[in-house]
Image: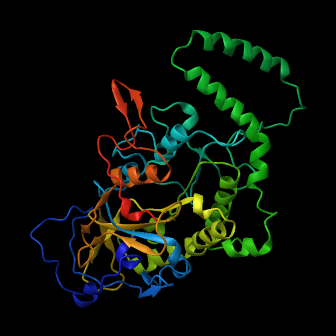
Amino acid sequence: MSHVDSFDHKPELDRHHGQSLKTDETPDIFFGRVGLLRRSDWAFKQRGESGLWISDMFPHIAEMADEMTLLRSLVSDSANHTPALFLLNSGFGANGFPSTGSWISYGLGNESQSLPTFVVLPDGRGGPNGGASNWSNGFLPAQHQGIVFRGGTQPVRDLFPPTKQPRGADAAVQRFLSTLNRQRTASSADGLVDARIRSYELAARMQASVPEVSDLTGEPRHIQDMYGLNDKLTADCGRRCLLGRRLLEKGVRFVQIYSGGPIAGSPRASWDAHESVRQNHGFEASRIDRPVAALLRDLRQRGMLDDTLVLFTTEFGRTPFAQSAANAVGPGRDHNRYGFSGWLAGGGVRRGASYGSTDDVGWKAAEHPMPWHDFHATLLHLLGVDHTELTYYHNGIQRRLTNVHGEVHTGVFA
């Protein structure tokens, strides 16, 4: 997502629109074509009592400005989607490492006996680059894997048998399997069998709990309307945001919602605005703006936001310069890892505040740069966990989410 078109107001881009970026450095971008500086396609306004600058791309989210801490100095080590997503989720640019949700599951445990600790709600159009590797448990025990919930009557794949069986019809089979499992567990030192058994036991409990929590029809009409469930454009994200709130109420620790997926032959998909930013971001933002704002509003009115931390992130930002001439019709922006924006809300962060900054045109983080290791360290601190103490021994190393890095940014705390 482009920070200079959403949450990072840069008046200097207006003044230098159509000029060249003044640098001797070759930017680390994806396509390598450095066009001219380009102003935002949306007007920025000061919002709420806090006066935070947020663009018209997100009119509904902008109404919630007084709940948010804008992070305007995020930094990534990669300008390529897949490793950048791995960095955001696990702190490492390769797959095979536990995701943030898995670390939180491992560190804080499960509050629900009938639902997973970590649930993933991917976009109805498809998942992110790297697929399930983004919510992998890596080398952590299997019960910390993110569990995907989908829409429709089968929210969890293979949760129910293809043909309905009478209650207790498989009791003899279950007793036999239990005997075998106890024998194997007694001779197994690595815990894999025990973790698999717990996964199956959870799946059995989920057969009763998942249909109940995923049925949104009982929500009041005004709540469904607030999330945009009755609008084709916002219904998919709205359902996932509302389901996320219901899962949190039931004790799920970590819910991760993805936005963006492929549309065949369309330049509008996945926030990847190498072509028209106006068309691409306008479409993607219109799908999530109302639902995300509704989630914040709903959490606040239910008294849940003070102990629920909402993270709005993107794997990197986009360049302040275009991939083509600044005055061309429908120019795009390339990937920008040097400085970009996200925001936090609830869970002990400042309300109506901004933290960090980029340079005058929004190319690089200038004040309080926050790489993902620092972001993760700060997140864990807000959840009551010391990032240096949350470790797991693997292949001779005490591994952790922040590797050997991580600085807690206390400036975001209330």
Colouring scheme applied when the structure was drawn: rainbow
Identify the residue at horizontal 29%, vertical 45% (top origin).
405
Instruction: Name the residue nearer the viewer: 256 or 176.
Output: 256
Observer able to see residue 266: no
What is the quadrant of residue 138 in the picture? top left
Location of residue 109 in the rendering, given as x and y in whole percent from the top left corner: 58, 39
Q: Residue furthest bottom?
A: 15
Location of residue 39 in the rendering, given as x and y in whole percent from the top left corner: 31, 85
Q: Residue furthest front?
A: 414
Identify the residue at horizontal 70%, vertical 39% (top origin).
158
**Relative horizontal placement of residue 40, taking residue 13 as reference (left or right):** right
Instruction: Look at the picture and state if 148 lies above or below 338.
Output: above
Number of numbered discs visible in the structure rendering: 0
Identify the residue at horizontal 37%, vertical 56% (top origin).
81
Observer able to see residue 127: yes
Identify the residue at horizontal 62%, vertical 67% (top origin).
295
Instruction: Look at the picture and state if 190 lies above or below 5.
Output: above
**Relative horizontal placement of residue 273, taking residue 25 as reference (left or right):** right
**Relative horizontal placement of residue 60, taking residue 197 as reference (left or right):** left
Instruction: Name the residue nearer the viewer: 9 or 345.
Output: 345
What is the quadrant of residue 275 in the picture? bottom left
Give the position of the N terminus as an image quadrant: bottom left
Q: Residue furthest left?
A: 24
Location of residue 148 in the rendering, given as x and y in whole percent from the top left corner: 60, 47
Instruction: Name the residue nearer the viewer: 222 or 228.
Output: 222
What is the quadrant of residue 336 in the picture? bottom left
Location of residue 84 in the rendering, given as x and y in whole percent from the top left corner: 35, 53
Instruction: Name the residue nearer the viewer: 167 or 297.
Output: 297
